[in-house]
Amino acid sequence: MREVVRTNDMVLISAIEALLKGADIGHIVTDGHTSVLEGSIGAIPRRILVTDDEEDEARRLLTEAGYAYVLRQDD
């Protein structure tokens, strides 16, 4: 799994999840429970991970949808 987005914006997460699901791209949202436990002060963002073999497709989809500004860069 590869991280493509890290954010605290629940609306953004929902929109990206809908796009990925609609394109049948395997993904998960992590750190949801940790984010809630820390009191929702924004210290621990949630991460959207996609399957390794679909990362390029996911990045292309999100870029075309106008979400390039939130994509994580390769480390």
Image (cartoon, rainbow, N blue to C red):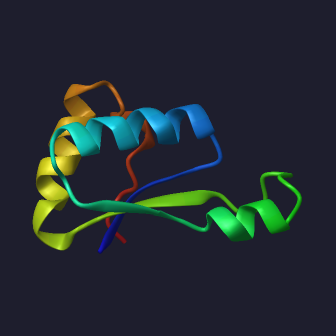
Residue at 65% x, 58% y is 45
42, above or below 22, in the image: below
- Residue 11, located in which quarter of the rendered image? top right
Left or right, 67 with reference to 7: left
Which residue is nearer to you in this view: 42 or 10?
A: 10
- Residue 69, located in which quarter of the rendered image? top left
Residue 75 horizontal/vertical position (percent): 37, 72
Left or right, 52 with reference to 11: left
Residue at 42% x, 32% y is 15
Residue at 29% x, 74% y is 1
Residue 71 horizontal/vertical position (percent): 38, 47
Q: What is the count of numbered marks?
A: 0
Residue at 26% x, 44% y is 21
Which residue is nearer to you in this view: 36 or 42?
A: 36
Which residue is nearer to you in this view: 9 or 17?
A: 17
68, above or below 59, in the image: above
Residue 72 horizontal/vertical position (percent): 40, 55
- Residue 33, located in which quarter of the rendered image? bottom right
69, above or below 75, in the image: above
Left or right, 31 with reference to 54: right
